[in-house]
Image (cartoon, rainbow, N blue to C red):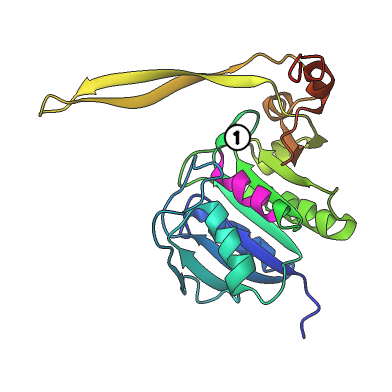
Amino acid sequence: MSEKPLILVTNDDGITAPGLRSLISIMNEIGDVVVVAPDSPQSAMGHAITINSTLYCSPINIDEEGHQIEYSCSGTPADCVKLAVNEILNRKPDICISGINHGSNSSINVIYSGTMSAAVEAGIEGIPAIGFSLCDYSWEANFDAIREDVKKITLNALKYGMPNGVVLNVNFPKLKKEEIKGIKICRQAKANWVEEFDKRTNPQGRDYYWLTGKFINHDKGQDTDEWALANGYISVVPVQYDLTAHHAIQDLNMWNLNG
């Protein structure tokens, strides 16, 4: 039996995405890799799961030189993790790694991210998990500069474990290897998207919309993921899936709800 850690790898850009292929290569240097990833892009799916249609998950062989086992799934990133844990693997993986996403998942983007939702789903299952993202949306993005840091962060997570109820959201600035200043543990910046809809009319006279918008960072703190990325650092944000606003419980207990 292999003494290597069992690593579940997934993403939201699809099983053929260069970011995923790069991540698989890195994880093959660490442990035994099983890939369960969407058969098509699932970006910005958040924590969606498939309940009103059938799910398909089939073995696939994309990389003949790799020694990983791969499955292509018709569902969302969260579906991929659920299927992996409940149907494909014969034991819980030692860690789940999601990514490497083509584009940022810092700040409020973590809410919409399929990459991070896969990691969160693993966390809910009691599996240490990390979501990796590179702030470069190009399909031809170069992941070589971050290879060593992806490996370093993963090895540390395997060695030290993860705090209970926490997964990691890791974002890399789009920089050359020698330009990256280091790694910072951060909080999520207080920022949001200001949406705009580009309204158009199709040839049949029916209105349709394209979602656009601007990302606005209201947070001037120097301990945030946005500050770290803007200043040449890799950001590591511990994310919890318990969404309870604990600080608000005392205020709500002052309401006259049972009077």
Whether the magenta-drawn stretch holds residue 118 is answered as yes
Left or right, 177 with reference to 174:
right
Quadrant of the frame with the C terminus: top right
- The residue drawn where x is 51% and y is 51% is 49
Left or right, 46 with reference to 128:
left
Q: Position of residue 182 (x, y in %)?
A: 79, 38
Judging depth in this view, the residue of 132 and 50 nearest the camera is 50
Quadrant in which residue 204 is drawn? top left
Judging depth in this view, the residue of 135 and 85 nearest the camera is 85
Q: Position of residue 126 (x, y in %)?
A: 76, 57
Q: Residues within 10 Å of mark 1 (few under 14, many from 20)?
A: some
Quadrant in which residue 191 is drawn? top right
Amino acid type shown at disc 1: Ile
For the record, the magenta segment spans: 113-122
Q: Is residue 72 in sight in this rendering?
A: yes
Report the residue marked by disc 1.
Answer: 111
Q: Position of residue 34 (x, y in %)?
A: 62, 70
Quadrant of the frame with the N terminus: bottom right
Q: Is residue 143 in sight in this rendering?
A: no
Q: Residue furthest front?
A: 259
Up the image or down, 151 lies above or below 185; here it is: below
Q: Position of residue 189 (x, y in %)?
A: 70, 24
Magenta stretch, main secondary structure class:
helix
Left or right, 15 with reference to 166:
left
Judging depth in this view, the residue of 186 and 195 nearest the camera is 195
Whether the magenta-drawn stretch holds residue 178 is answered as no
- The residue drawn where x is 45% and y is 20% is 213
